[in-house]
Image (spheres, rainbow, N blue to C red):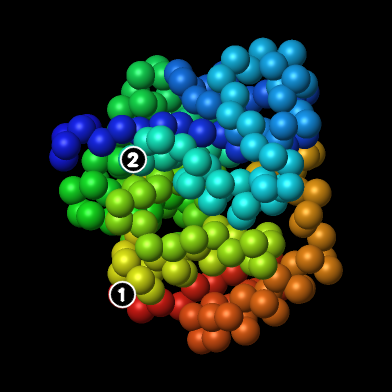
Amino acid sequence: MNQDCKSIGIYVPSYKRYDRIMTWNVLNDCTYVVRESEEEAYREAGITKILTGPDEEINSLAKVRQWIIDNTPEDIVIQCDDDISMMIYKGKNNKVEITDKDAIDMEFERVAQILEDLRLGFASCTMTGDVRKFNAEFLFKGITGGICWFNKEYLKSRFDNMTYIKEDTDFVLQELLQNRIIIIPDYFGMQNQYDKNAGGNNENKNLRALNQTVEYMKNKWGKYYDHNFRTNQSRINVKR
């Protein structure tokens, strides 16, 4: 990167998926972030770069995301889901697997450089690799997750553990209202097992938790947030 050569680190928060290692095999270099009680199991599974945190400090997605931001040395940290099966380039009605790991690194660095050039705090890919939903190479608001960039110098938000299973949506709203825009590169992304792979945050995702979280989000954000229970999709209402 330019701009004073900021450092970049790639981290993969993971929980109870030591028997289903995926993202490690897709990327050139990354560090898994796991609870201390599970370190040995992940090492036995072949993960050689591990950062451990006290179980009680990283026992939710919101907690572990914030813990990584607070406890890593790099200027920009990229956090990736642990169930990524491939990285893809996508466009209108087509997608292509990125088999060159160096090309993946290049795209990660490109987005990090855009954040730095624009003095912004946050970027993320969309939640799906479905090319039917492709509208443009870059978006500036939306429901994100899967891969997130955090530029610590300009980041103005913190993860709220009370948002439970809508932590990424809550974080996006914070950045939109405090930093004005976020960057969503949609010309590339990931193919993963979103909400289907056992372990991870899926153990928390049930109807009762969803209802409680949506109610909390509505009380917190008012007109800026809504949720469609029929399609199970959240909506953020920040005009641009």
User: What kind of residue is marked 2?
Assistant: Asp
> Quadrant location of the N terminus?
top left
Q: Amino acid at mark 1?
A: Arg
Q: Is residue 218 left or right of residue 105?
A: right
Marker disc for residue 54 = none
Instruction: From the top left corner, tell me how far across and down residue 196 is, in percent.
Output: 74, 43
Residue 104 quadrant? top left
Q: Of helix, strand and loop, which one carries label 2?
A: loop
- Which element is circle 1 on? loop
Is residue 71 at all visible to an observer of this figure? yes
Residue drawn at x 70%, y 79% is: 215
Where does the C terminus fall, quadrant-wise? Answer: bottom left
Instruction: Give the percent coordinates (x, y) of residue 27.
Output: 48, 23
Label 2: how many Cα within 10 Å (few below 14, some 14–19, many 20+): some
Between residue 133 and residue 234, name the one nearer to us: 234
* In the image: residue 88, left or right of residue 75: right
Residue 205 placed where, x, y %? 77, 56
First along the sequence among labels 2 and 1:
2
Residue drawn 63% across and 17% down? 47
Query: Would you name the residue on which mark 2 appears?
Result: 75
- The label shown at residue 240 is 1
Q: Is residue 82 above or below residue 175?
A: above
To which quarter of the image does residue 187 belong? top left
Residue drawn at point x = 62 percent, y = 52 percent: 63
The answer to whether 97 appears left or right of 226 in the picture is left
Residue, x 40% and y 17% (percent of image)?
Answer: 100
- Residue at the extreme left: 3
